[in-house]
Image (tube, rainbow, N blue to C red):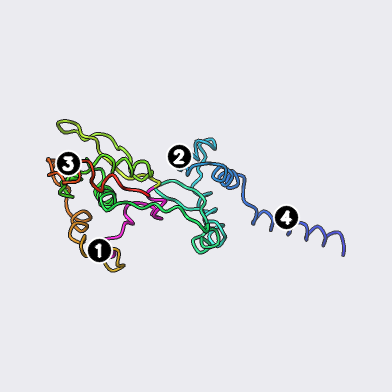
Amino acid sequence: MNEDAMTEDALEEAAAANETAPDDLVRAVEAALFASQEPMTVEALSAHLGQADIRPALAELQRHYAGRGIHLVERGKRWHFETAPDLAHLLRREKEELRRLSRAATEVLAIVAYHEPVSRAEIESIRGVQTAKGTLDVLMEAGWVRVAGRREVPGRPVIYATTPEFLAHFGLRSLKELPGIDELRAAGLLDPVDDDMIEAALSGPVPQERDAPEEAGDRDGHGDDDDDVT
């Protein structure tokens, strides 16, 4: 092989390497996400990397990891790597810690997710009974509900909303992906006993704030609201 042919081959190999090798920004975004202990927003990533436009790099990384064992996903406007769903069974531990919510906590979580931001009085108006403080505490300790501020009405009640952790746990990019009442019913996820209440919680308008009647259990401190997680 003559020298010209060798030079031409070397140039072709170099060109091919340039086409397939990720650029420095893509590698930097990948490293930042891999090293981060928490999901990161586009703004946080950009600030960390000198205000660079990192959206094309995120799109390229998503394509790169699409068929691999981990995926790059966006949940609640935050980006992180997660295990490919079809491989979850390989990583599941033999003994899992189950988090069981009481009926009251499940109702409250559904109301917050579908009507956020809502106050405690609005939650109680939809449920028709008072909500024990422990119920919202359990949901906040789980990282699924947060205090979102105060409503600008007399008394300025605290209002609640869901968190990015709630979206990540249920595999949602945003609250727009929450299933509708018909989808839940078709999937068999609604108990016929609770159907009317859940439908009101999911699709009804948020009522004006008012006092709600107490449950017998709430009056004596032994309602099921406080027994939320096992």
| Crowd band around label 1 with a 10 angstrom C-alpha radius: few (<14), some (14–19), many (20+) | few
Residue at (14% x, 31% y) in the render: 154
Q: Position of residue 12 (x, y in %)?
A: 73, 59
Residue to which mark 3 is pinned = 219
Which secondary structure lies at badge 3?
helix
Residue to which mark 1 is pinned = 191
For badge 2, the amino acid type reads Glu
Query: Would residue 210 be found to the left or right of residue 19 on screen?
Result: left
Query: Would residue 6 be found to the left or right of residue 75 on screen?
Result: right
Q: CA distance from mark 2 to mark 3?
A: 47 Å
| Crowd band around label 3 with a 10 angstrom C-alpha radius: few (<14), some (14–19), many (20+) | few
Which secondary structure lies at badge 4?
helix
Residue at (38% x, 44% y) in the render: 142
Mark 1 touching mark 4, by CB under 8 A? no
| Crowd band around label 2 with a 10 angstrom C-alpha radius: few (<14), some (14–19), many (20+) | some
Residue to which mark 2 is pinned = 43
For badge 3, the amino acid type reads Arg
Query: Would residue 210 be found to the left or right of residue 229 on screen?
Result: left
Q: Which mark is residue 14?
A: 4
**Of the residues tagged 4 and 3, which is closer to the observer?**
3
